[in-house]
Image (tube, grey):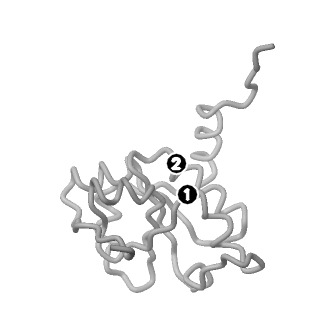
Amino acid sequence: MSQTISYGVKTMIASAKAAIEEIPAADAIALHGNPNVTFVDIRDPRELEREGKVPGAFHCPRGMLEFWIDPESTYYKERFGEDKKFVFFCAGGLRSVLATKLAQDMGLKPVAHIIGGFKSWREVGGPTEVYVPKHK
């Protein structure tokens, strides 16, 4: 029997975009370095190794997001308890739309995501640096 997906990615993304704040990459660059803003990179570590990273961004792999945000989780990261604005991004801006909506639904605020993700960040001249894994 084949599966019928009734709530697909396109619908999920459109619904999330309607409910969250989206920031153009150029505007996000203007926020970079603001002590009241935490950039959250949800890309896979292999993406960071391949493409580089935003200096000072907090890396939270997408698969751990819910666990790192929830103070009741054994995986909770205190960074998510800080009174700051959290700006999420991924490679192209799709995963971060969903991640931002999820974080907002969990009660994290204020939150936003970078339109076009890391790709747009680089295209408009945002600072980047080489990612050095902690285990190497």
* Left or right placement of residue 96 versus residue 107 in this view: left
Q: Which mark is residue 62?
A: 1
Residue 4 percent coordinates (x, y): 76, 20
> Residue at (31%, 67%) from the top-left corner?
54
- The amino acid marked with disc number 2 is Arg
Question: What is the distance, in whole Å, between disc 2 and disc 1 at their CAs?
Answer: 8 Å
Question: From the viewer's perspective, is residue 121 above or below residue 17?
Answer: below
Residue under circle 2? 95
Label 1 element class: helix
Of the pair 61 and 97, the residue shown nearer to us? 61
Q: Which mark is residue 28?
A: none
> Residue at (36%, 81%) from the top-left corner?
34
Q: Quadrant of residue 5?
A: top right
* Left or right placement of residue 90 versus residue 55 in this view: right
Label 2 element class: helix
Q: Quadrant of residue 76?
A: bottom right
Residue 64 percent coordinates (x, y): 61, 63
Q: Residues within 10 Å of mark 1 (few under 14, many from 20)?
A: some
Question: From the viewer's perspective, is residue 67 above or below residue 45?
Answer: below
Of the pair 62 and 46, the residue shown nearer to us? 46
- The amino acid marked with disc number 1 is Arg
* Left or right placement of residue 16 versus residue 2 in this view: left
Quarter placement of the C terminus:
bottom left
Of the pair 63 and 123, the residue shown nearer to us? 63
- Tell me whether circle 2 and circle 1 mark residues in contact (CB < 8 Å): yes
